[in-house]
Amino acid sequence: MKRSSMLKSSKIFAELFDVSKGAYSVKGKFLTVKFRLFPSEKPQAKVGFVVGKRWVKRAVDRNFVKRRLREAYRQQQFILVKDLSYLVNDQGIELIFIYRSRHMISSREIFVEVSELMLRMSHRLRSIQ
């Protein structure tokens, strides 16, 4: 993934967590995706990943989970980009994946969960438009 497609600003993360700022969410078994549309010249997706200390205690394990999430998103991002290109005009999407499980989940389970959430998110985008 390109660095330009990663969310880094703590302000944007805070706005995505704040319900009153117009963020939508889609929940799965152990992942939640929060997203919102923003003005952009071309359809683009900016993504961030959150694995809290509450759920995964050791920093090494949190980083490991984030790597798995990034890889699953990288393999599935075509779903979102394809929908963005014809659904929204002059808008991009900012999204964060929030990991909510005390157990280490396998790469395959993360891949399946991310793909399900991406599909549900694209259906939600269609209903917004």
Image (tube, rainbow, N blue to C red):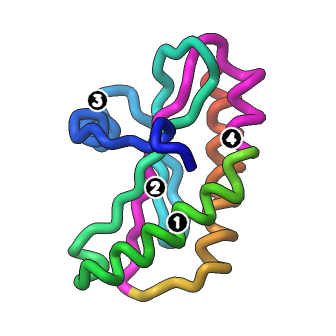
The span from disc 3 to disc 2 (Cα, nearest Å) is 19 Å
**Is any part of residue 23 visible from this angle?**
yes
Residue 97 got which mark?
Answer: 2
Residue type at mark 3 is: Ser
Residue 68 sits above or below residue 115 on the image: below
Circles 3 and 4, Cβ within 8 Å, touching? The answer is no
In three-dimensional space, the C-alpha distance between marks 3 and 4, rounded to whole angstroms, equals: 24 Å
Labels 4 and 2 touching (C-beta < 8 A)? no
Query: What amino acid type should be assigned to the residue bearing mark 1?
Result: Leu
In magenta stretch: residue 81: yes
Mark 3 Cα-neighbour bin, 10 Å: few <14, some 14–19, many ≥20: few
Whether pointer 1 and pointer 4 mark residues with C-beta atoms closer than 8 Å, the reply is no
At label 2, the amino acid type is Phe
Which label was assigned to residue 20? 3
Question: Which mark lies nearer to you, 1 or 3?
Answer: 1
- Sequence order check: which comes first, mark 1 or mark 3? 3
Q: Is tag 3's residue or tag 2's residue first in the polypeptide sequence?
A: 3
**Residue at horizontal 69%, vertical 28%?**
84
Numbered disc in front, either 3 or 2: 2
Residue 42 in the image, given as x and y percentages of width and height:
62, 17
Residue 112 among those drawn in magenta? no
Q: Which residue is mark 1?
A: 69
Provide the residue span drawn in magenta. Answer: 79-102
Q: Residues within 10 Å of mark 1 (few under 14, many from 20)?
A: many
Closer to the camera, 59 or 28? 59
Mark 1 / mark 4, whichever is N-terminal: 1
Tell me if label 1 and label 2 are in contact, CB under 8 Å. Answer: yes
